[in-house]
Image (cartoon, rainbow, N blue to C red):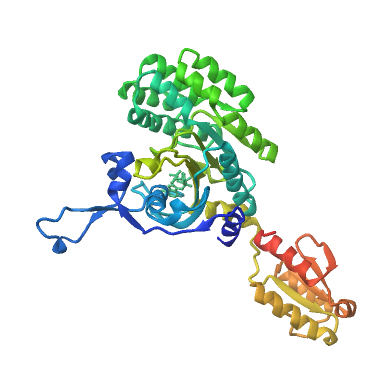
Amino acid sequence: METIRKTIESYGYAEVQTPTFEFLKLFEIRSGEKFRDDVFVFQDPTKYLKDEDKVVDYVLRPEYTAPICRMYITSDLCIQPKPVKIYYIGSCYRYETPQPGRYREFTQVGVELIGSPHPEADVELIILAAEVLKALKLKKFIIRINDLNILRGLLSDFDHDYDAQNRIFNAIDGAAGALRKLDLNVPINKTREGVIEEVQTELKELGVAPELSKILESFLELHGDAKEVIPRIQALVKKAPTAVKAIDNSPLKFVVEKLKNYGLIDCEIDLGIARGLDYYTNIVFEIDLPILGNQKQVCGGGRYNRLIQEFGGEDTPATGFAFGFDRLLLAYSKVHERKKPSSPVDALICTYSPDEQDWALQVAGELRKEGFKVEIDLMRRKFKSSLSNANKREIPFAIIIGPTEKEQQELTLKDLESGIQDTMTYDDALNEMKEKLWGID
Ligand code: HAM
């Protein structure tokens, strides 16, 4: 968690916290009454309610963005210079069918960047999410980006209003999610054809015309490089003027280009990303860690330029993302499990003679303070037999201290797995042990 905090704070974000429960009404402003089907709702204890009291519904926080917007409007955050950059860490609750990586109680780590309407803000935000993953040494991720204005434009050209658009988004989001899993050979008990048939039925039930349904089905398979994807979208929506305009004005190309120039090569445009939450307006994105299989989406976010105003605040553009911390932990342990030593001891200090005992005690003491488990040979074994003792016990490191090391106040660190050894300062040895044993730079 400290690595994540440090990375987020290095971009100028300050930590805030909101209550674990919120007014249900807050979420219903945007999502309507159906929202309560997927969350945990409760009321004031009846014994405290008087006849004239209105029953107030509360909800266990399902996510942070709406509560943060409420906090922004009702605190002095809204008069601070823009952009306001805040982050949070805490439990969220959703009524899910529990399964590995999908829980009813889980932890989110998220950031919100409030006040900038410019795509530079989206770029920096996505870079920050990627840097969090890199700092955790979770390097194999895929960033998928979309601009919901294109989809919204298309749907409004076919006379679907904002709320109808959100219902259609949900259908597309579910189907695209399933297709991307099939792309990565994640078993989901459905075929490609089955997913398409299901979404066709859903779209029909939502009153989507066959012509529009066909375009949306093509969107589901439309992902890849900006140069390839954008002309294909243009061809698909050429008869829909609002969608055409949305593509011309879209910051998608700018954002993807900037991310690639920064070195994030695994990022693609994905027209299937519609996001499950109802407040998104423009650029949205998701990050997948394929190592997680079925619940591979470790991060999701995007712009919600209308929400603050819908809650009664000023017209304020905003964007943000949240990581599923439990999923980060799962991925972290999968990636780093090979590094787990079979021995409970991290390093054994082997000295040439009792003359080096003082320096050995000092090195052991410092390493223990850092959190390593360190032993010094207490059997007065000869140096070679001490090393073979470390090998037999599968201790990952031997720290060798002879007269030269003692004199230079250095040490020789031997990686017993690879056999490589080198004489170095205490600080260098500390870093090497941290990297090998904990995966930290
Ligand atoms: P979300 O995609 O619903 O977005 O959730 C963000 C992340 O939380 C997901 O990518 C996933 O890793 C994790 N997550 C969601 N549900 C569960 C669950 N049941 N069990 C375990 N992990 C889960 C949001 O919540 C938005 N508020 C993000 C955002 C911030 N958008 C703008 N600002």
As rendered, which of 91 and 292 lies closer to the eye? 91
Residue at 58 percent across and 38 percent down: it is 143
In this rendering, the answer to whether 22 lies above or below 150 is below
Question: From this viewpoint, which residue is outermost toward the left?
Answer: 51
Q: Is residue 192 visible?
A: no
Q: Position of residue 411 (x, y in %)?
A: 82, 73
Taking the spot 58% from the left edge, 23% from the top edge, the residue there is 229
Where residue 438 sits: x, y (%)?
65, 62
Number of labels in the image equals 0
Q: Give the x, y percent position of residue 441.
A: 70, 59
Locate residue 219 relative to residue 386 in the image: left or right: left
Above or below: residue 160 compared with residue 283: above
Relative to residue 319, is residue 307 drawn left or right? left
Position above or below: 103 against 234:
below
Q: Is any part of residue 306 visible from this angle?
A: yes
Work out whether residue 214 or residue 190 is closer to the camera in this orientation and state it.
214
**Residue 104, x across and y down, in percent:** 37, 52
Q: Is residue 418 left or right of residue 182?
A: right
> Relative to 175, does residue 435 appear above or below in the rendering?
below
Residue drawn at 45 percent across, 22 percent down: 217
Of 172 and 15, nearer the camera is 15
Image-based side of 341 in relation to 19, left or right? right
Quarter of the figure with the N terminus? bottom right
